[in-house]
């Protein structure tokens, strides 16, 4: 798979994982695990990139005497998620065209 395409898909998966409620790294990986495997290093690289792009914001809270970062999707992140869904619909139409069986009229 094209690395840029995969990178974009992983970013959208992370946004989807935090769409309903704020979350933290370990929980994001756990929530995504039934659908996609992701290492912690990959996740934190993506989270940092999404934060830089203002698609999410980060807050720190104490949990069990340790600091934990929670991630919250922004309106820009929600827009990106919605754009992806629309782009994917278009891509599925193209996929159906490319994979349809050729009918020979011999």
Image (cartoon, rainbow, N blue to C red):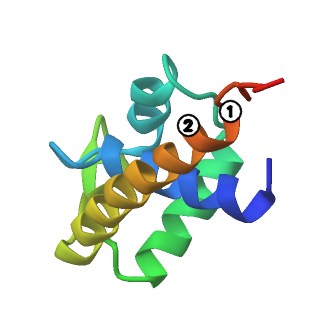
Badge 1: how crowded within 10 Å, few (<14), some, or many (20+)?
Answer: few
Q: Outermost residue, right direction?
A: 106
Tell me where residue 57 appears, x and y as whole percent: 29, 72
Find residue 9 and report its horizontal and vertical position in percent: 55, 52
Is residue 76 shown above or below 12?
below
In depth, the one of 68 and 103 nearer the eye is 103
Q: Is residue 96 left or right of residue 27?
A: right
Which residue is at a point 72% across and 65% down the rendered structure image?
4
Residue marked by disc 1: 99
Q: Nearer the viewer, residue 62 or 53?
A: 53
Q: Which residue is mark 2?
A: 96
Q: Nearer the viewer, residue 75 or 100?
A: 100
From the viewer's perspective, is 98 left or right of 70?
right
For the residue labelled by badge 1, is the local secondary structure a helix, a strand or a loop?
helix
Estimate the x, y position of residue 14 in percent, counting from the top left: 43, 49
Taking the spot 35% from the left edge, 82% from the top edge, the residue there is: 54
In the image, is residue 56 above or below residue 65? below
């Amino acid at each position: 798979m094209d690395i840029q395409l995969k990178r974009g898909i992983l970013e959208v998966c992370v946004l989807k994982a935090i769409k309903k409620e704020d979350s933290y790294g370990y929980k994001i990986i756990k929530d995504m695990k039934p659908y996609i495997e992701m290492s912690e290093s990959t996740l934190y690289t993506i989270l940092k990139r999404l934060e830089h792009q203002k698609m999410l914001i980060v807050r720190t809270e104490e949990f069990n005497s340790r600091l934990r970062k929670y991630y919250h999707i922004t309106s820009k992140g929600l827009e990106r998620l919605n754009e992806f869904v629309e782009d994917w619909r278009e891509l599925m139409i193209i996929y159906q065209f490319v994979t349809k069986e050729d009918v020979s009229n011999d």
